[in-house]
Structure formats: C-alpha cells, structure tokens
Image: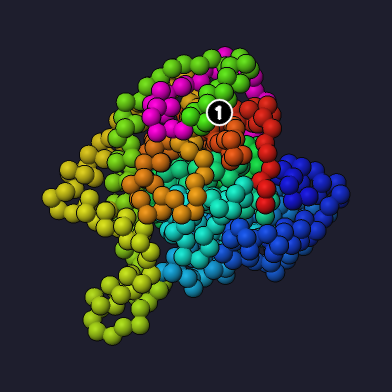
Amino acid sequence: MVSMTIKEMRRSLDSGEIGAAELTKSYLDRIEKVDPQLESYITVTAEKALAEAAAAQKRIDSGDTTPLTGIPLAIKDNICTEGVRTTAASRMLENFVPPYNATVMERLDSAGAVMLGKVSMDEFAMGGSTQTSAFKKTKNPYDLSRVPGGSSGGSAAAVGADLCAAALGSDTGGSIRQPASFCGVTGLKPTYGRVSRYGLIAFASSLDQIGPIARSAEDCGLILNAIAGYDYHDGTVSRRDVPDFCEKIGMDMKGVKIGLVSEFFAEGVDDEVRKSVLSAIDTYKSMGAEVVECSMPSLKYAIASYYLIACAEASSNLARYDGIKYGHRADVGGSYNDLVVASRSEGFGDEVKRRILLGNYALSSGYYDAYYGKAMGLKQKIREEYADIFGKCDLIITPTAPTVAYGTNENIADPKKMYQADFCTVTVNIASLPAISTTCGYDAQGMPIGMSIVGRMWDEASVIAAADAFEHNFDRIKAKI
C-alpha cells in the first residue's frame, strides 16, 4: 500500500479497496518503525493527519474528490504550516509556530491532501547533504552511511523509503533535483513564478521555487496541478493560465530534438554517471528522438555566479532574524548590538554564517560592481545561451549530479568541493527554467544515478511527459531500508 503511486492510490481509495485513514495509518506506522534510522521527519503530525484523513474519507464517500484527496504527503520544514512548528532546520526557528499557511498548503488543504509531518533539510536550505540540519541529519534510504542530498534531503529520503506518498521541497540551485537523484526518486523544479513562494522561508528570492518530489513524473504533474497558479500574496507569480501538466503524457518522442550540452559531460562527472545518462539518451533515440550536440561556454562560471547571487540575497533575507520580534533570542544583557550579535551567533549554524558573510562582502561598498554586478551580467549571458540552445532543441538532458550519494562524513568540511558539485543544476535556476530529475541507472554499489530533463520556460508538461516516457522503459530498484 505505501509503495503505490498517487495514481494507483487514487484508484484504490475511490473504489473503496482501501480507506483514507487506513492508508494514513500505514504511513504513520512505517514512520514510527523506520524513521529512527533514516531521520527524515523533524515533526510528525499524527493526530492532524488522521483528522485530515477522516475529512478526506467523507469527500471520497460523497464523490467530491481531486487527484490528491486522501493522499498522505510530507512537507519540507521551510514551508509555513499554520499551528505546526516550522524550523527551517535551524536553532534560530526552533520554536517558531506560524500563524498562517503558505499558499501551497492552502491549495493542498483545498485538494484534500493529508499532511504527515515536516521533514528535514539543510539549515535555511543552504547545503547539498542535509547534514547542516540542526535537528535531523537525514540518511540515504539506499545506504544509511551516505547522505540523501540536499537541501530537500528529508523530502527525497521520505519518498524513497516509502514514508510518504510524495513530498514538497524547494529548489534554489538544485535542492529538489539533486536529492531526488541521490535517493532514486523523481523531483520537479517548476519554472520560476509558476508556484507561489508566499509562506516559503526565503533563501534567495530570485531563485527559490517550491516543487514536488514523488515516485514518478506523472505524480509530480498531479501535485503541480494542485499548487501552481497566480497568488496575489506573491508579486513574482505568473498570471498565466495553469494547464494540465499531465496533458502531454504519452506523447510520441519521434522527432523530439534533445540537446546534449558537451560541458555537462566533461571533467568532474563520474564515468558511471556519464555512462548512465548517455545510455538514457540512447533510449530516447530508440524512441525516435533526435540528439543535437550543443555547447554552453558560460557553464564554467556558473558556480561563481550562482553563489554570489544566492548569498547576496540570503544575507538580505536573513537580516530579519535579530532576536527581537521572533526566532532565537540570546539570554544576554548589555546593548541592542550585543543582543543581536549573540542571538545570530547562537541561532545560525556554520554554513549559514559562511553564506551571510559572503553575501555581505559581495554587496559591500567597493565590491558590489566587481562581484554582484558581474554575477548578474553572467546571469543574463547564461539565459541567452539557453535561449540559443532551445532555438535548436526541444529539451536538454544532463546529469543531475556529477556523482552518486557520498558518505555522511565526506565533503562536509570542504565547502568549495560541495559548491562545485552543483554545476549540473544551478544554471536552471539562474535561467528560471523548469527541470525534472528521474533515475536513469545505478552504480556498481547499487546507488541511484539521476538525469535531468530541462525544458523551455512554462513548458513543464513536455518535461514531465519526456520523463514519464523514460520511466516506462526503466526498471527502478527499491531502496533497501
């Protein structure tokens, strides 16, 4: 029951084969049994989940259902949930209980979804391993000695270990796609502006986007159908009509032009990863797709550009946490300045402090033009290069990450190495494009390898359909946990 796709659950719930409360309890029981090893949940909302399941069952009995009615989901802990602790995996917000819901939560509630709880992440979404979490340093369901990726590692691990039907994550530079790759599941980063960010605890406001992590591309489309669309609370959300993101599923891949950007397969990508992604591209060729070789010269500067922009915005967004209105407040006397310094020093972890310092430096007088200004110029250049590629191609396929999941004690003490590993994902956020990661292979130790399918702005439907076509030609291996 807990391993079914959302589509399969929908059929079983509507036919009466299973009940909403039975399904929810099955997940809660599995969380209680498995999660002490995995450490994916920061907060489990069992009582709330069972109440929502009971309400969902009434809707099912009356025939008033949506694709998500009665479906148990996990929510990344940087998405505000009214009356439920929302920590962003930081001591700074350890006891923060939001008085309102994020827009995506309002929409999931309207759809009749069930919230199982809040899952772990890198602190304030800053990291690629979920090891910077102040509370739960999540493990990989395929190998508990390895990381699940990040920053949405709790979301991806929970889906991969069958501790929820699907989950919401957020993606600033790969934070949905990279953990989906590491944990052997599917993760979708929508076009920037497709989903409201109202109620998302901000990291980098021009890059952040909420999206789904699930067992299949189609499940991701079903969730995106529920959460996408205009919201007057968020001035960056598009007013475009929201299509059915699953409408192109089953499309013929014959004649579809797939871009193979040489720089994404160059030095730094493990041989097993490169081989698996190129093999997946061969699968598309066997379906009739055409491969077009392309180049993105600016990719070598993408990491520097991304981290300057993201850290600059982070330093601004995190300035609000001063120990005065809400968040951690140090128990010190003295001046206002002493209080702020002590509160921020105690409340933030090392990685968050590192990024605030880098952002403040990039924005400081005398350095703004040399660093932040140039990074913004490169952002435009990367967008132009993507536009040129999409003038010749319909989709682009790249590795999601240059390696499989690494050990929990690897790379943590080497921030530069951690940052460099994001080069496969950050340009998608810089260019505001949609992309999905799905499993395309396994290495010699059985660890999942993910590929990313990148599409034109607002064309999530083609990205989902292309991933779905591959998933029907690929046999996944279940996690061992």
Residue 317, x across and y down, in percent: 34, 58
Q: Which residue does the image show at 38% across and 70% down from the upper left?
A: 347
Vertical comparison of 156 with 280: above or below: below
> Few, some or many C-alpha atoms within 10 Å of disc 1 (few <14, some 14-19, many ≥20)?
many
Q: Which residue does the image show at 36% across and 59% down from the upper left?
A: 352
Q: Of 398 and 205, which appears nearest the observer? A: 398
Q: Residue furthest left?
A: 366
Question: Which type of secondary structure does the marked residue at label 1 adopt?
Answer: helix
Q: Which residue does the image show at 42% across and 29% down from the upper left?
A: 264
Q: Is residue 246 magenta?
A: yes
Residue 403, x across and y down, in percent: 48, 38
Left or right: 376 in relation to 91: left
Q: Residue furthest bottom?
A: 333
Q: Is residue 92 visible?
A: yes
Q: Is residue 389 magenta?
A: no
Vertical comparison of 49 with 412: above or below: below
Magenta stretch in the rendered image: 242-270
Q: Of 303 and 39, which appears nearest the observer? A: 39
Q: Which residue does the image show at 68% across and 39% down from the upper left?
A: 477
Residue 201, x across and y down, in percent: 44, 58
**Amino acid under disc 1:** Ser
- Which residue corresponds to mark 1? 276
Q: Main secondary structure of the magenta part?
A: loop
Q: Of 225 and 239, which appears nearest the observer? A: 225
